[in-house]
Amino acid sequence: MRARPQVCEALLFALALQTGVCYGIKWLALSKTPSALALNQTQHCKQLEGLVSAQVQLCRSNLELMHTVVHAAREVMKACRRAFADMRWNCSSIELAPNYLLDLERGTRESAFVYALSAAAISHAIARACTSGDLPGCSCGPVPGEPPGPGNRWGGCADNLSYGLLMGAKFSDAPMKVKKTGSQANKLMRLHNSEVGRQALRASLLVNSRCQAWEAACALPSLGSHQEQKVWPPWKEGRTSKETDKIKNNLAA
């Protein structure tokens, strides 16, 4: 008896999800970039491990961004190990980048989480680098359209959400947009998981209120100038279990 076409298609789709190579997170090998590599010349981009050609081109055209990308890769390593420190799968295999084991080579829940975490981390790092003045191509985020809290006004230097998400997605999604590499099913699944990470990052945006005046005057709203800005909590504090669960519940694997 011949199998129905729909059944065959479903089996092929499932097989594709399980056997796809995780080329999309090989860039995490940047965490091993030696400090001696200055990353101040375009020829340095070819010396970076784990990048596809599109990422090398992004490196050449946005060289000032690469120290931040390297920092993001290192933060992914630490954050993943922290998130799974007390579990059977403890994310130790992430340190083998770019030559992963099967737990991250295939379309597993573990690899899906790493895709989401990586996408969130690089966007977070770029947005923060804009705020701190480390990137000449961007600055503080724009003033939000919604009104601030009662008695306050928008001010200070907010994290540049839009630029961080834009450039972070360009870099981390680049491997999934290479036409000749991998199946379309794998690419769509991994793009979905990367977007889950960015959505969780958007949801974690905080409104930070601080007083731009002498400390004594801040106790009196009429004397202190209270400013609010939208910021992300420092990545070094790690994601909360609630945020981690939000990522896990929306992954495709």
Image (cartoon, rainbow, N blue to C red):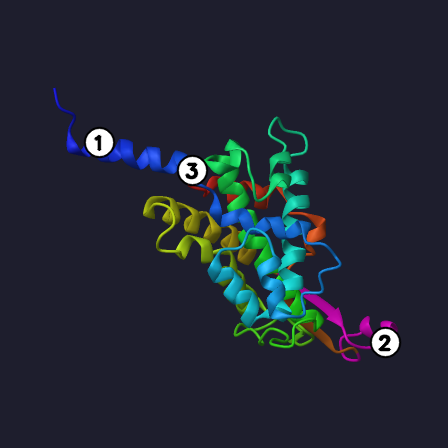
Left or right position of 243 against 8: right
Mark 2 — residue?
A: 214
- Which label sits in the foreground, 2 or 1? 1
Are the residues flagged by discs 2 and 1 in contact, CB closer than 8 Å? Answer: no
**Quadrant in which residue 157 is drawn:** bottom right
**Residue nearer the viewer, 252 or 244:** 252
In the image, residue 83 sits, relative to residue 209, either above or below, namely above
Mark 3 and mark 1 lie on one chain; the one further toward the N terminus is: 1
Q: Residue furthest top?
A: 1
**Quadrant in which residue 5 is drawn:** top left
- Which label sits in the foreground, 2 or 3? 3
Are the residues flagged by discs 2 and 3 in contact, CB closer than 8 Å? Answer: no
Q: Residue at x 77, y 76 (%)?
A: 212
Q: Position of residue 194 (x, y in %)?
A: 48, 51
| Disc 1 residue crowd, few under 14, some 14–19, many 20+, Cα 10 Å | few
Amino acid of disc 2: Trp
Query: What range of the chain is rendered magenta?
Result: 206-223
Mark 3 — residue?
A: 253
| Disc 2 residue crowd, few under 14, some 14–19, many 20+, Cα 10 Å | few
Q: Is residue 147 visible?
A: yes
Q: Quadrant of the N terminus?
A: top left
Q: Position of residue 15 (x, y in %)?
A: 34, 33
- Which label sits in the foreground, 3 or 1? 1
**Residue nearer the viewer, 166 or 18:** 18
Question: Looking at the rendered structure, which numbered label has been put on residue 8?
Answer: 1
Assign a secondary structure to mark 1.
helix
Q: Position of residue 205 (x, y in %)?
A: 59, 59
